[in-house]
Image (spheres, rainbow, N blue to C red):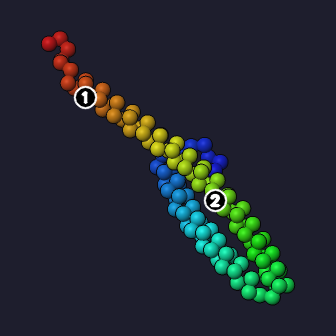
Amino acid sequence: LLGVDELPLDDTLAAVSDLEATASVANTAVATTRTFLLTKRVDAKRLSAELSKEFSAQLKQFQDQLDAHAKKLSALKERTAERKKTALRREADQLVEAGEGLAKKLAAAAAPPAGG
């Protein structure tokens, strides 16, 4: 969806659905990784002071990287939600146009014959 102004509606809805599914999996991975890092921080406290300090510093780096990726994921989810809203509006517009066309056909069919 990046770099393309507007895909056909069906393609857009499919791409948005794929993005939502992928973001959900990534979100679960972020949560699992956060839990893992927290448990390792607790484990680090059981080590000698020197090892604990070194291990904790490395865990902090991993946590910082995870936070950066989580922030990117959050931004992706926001952009995906906007794309979904736009696609759903397009779909609604198409349905309204189709409904208006059917209403015109029905009105024309129900009109009394001309000259009669």
Instruction: Report whether 11 appears left or right of 45.
Output: left
Locate residue 95: give its quadrant: top left
In this rendering, the answer to whether 17 lies above or below 37 is above
Q: Residue at x 52, y 62 (%)?
A: 21
Which of the two residues, 5 or 56, is positioned nearer the viewer here?
56
Q: Which image quarter is the C terminus in? A: top left
Locate residue 45: give its quadrant: bottom right
Q: Amino acid at mark 1?
A: Leu
Q: To which residue does mark 2 refer?
A: 73
The image position of residue 74, as x and y in percent, is 63, 56
Q: Residue at x 29, y 29 (%)?
A: 103
| Residue 84 visible, this angle | yes
Mark 1, other Cα within 10 Å: few <14 / some 14–19 / many ≥20: few
Mark on residue 106?
A: 1
In this rendering, the answer to whether 61 lies above or below 88 is below
The image position of residue 40, as x and y in percent, is 69, 80
Residue furthest out toward the right: 50
Mark 2, other Cα within 10 Å: few <14 / some 14–19 / many ≥20: some
Q: Amino acid at mark 2?
A: Leu
Q: Residue at x 81, y 88 (%)?
A: 48
- Could you tell me if the residues under marks 1 and 2 are in contact, i.e. CB atoms within 8 Å? no
Q: Secondary structure at mark 2?
A: helix
Mark on residue 77?
A: none
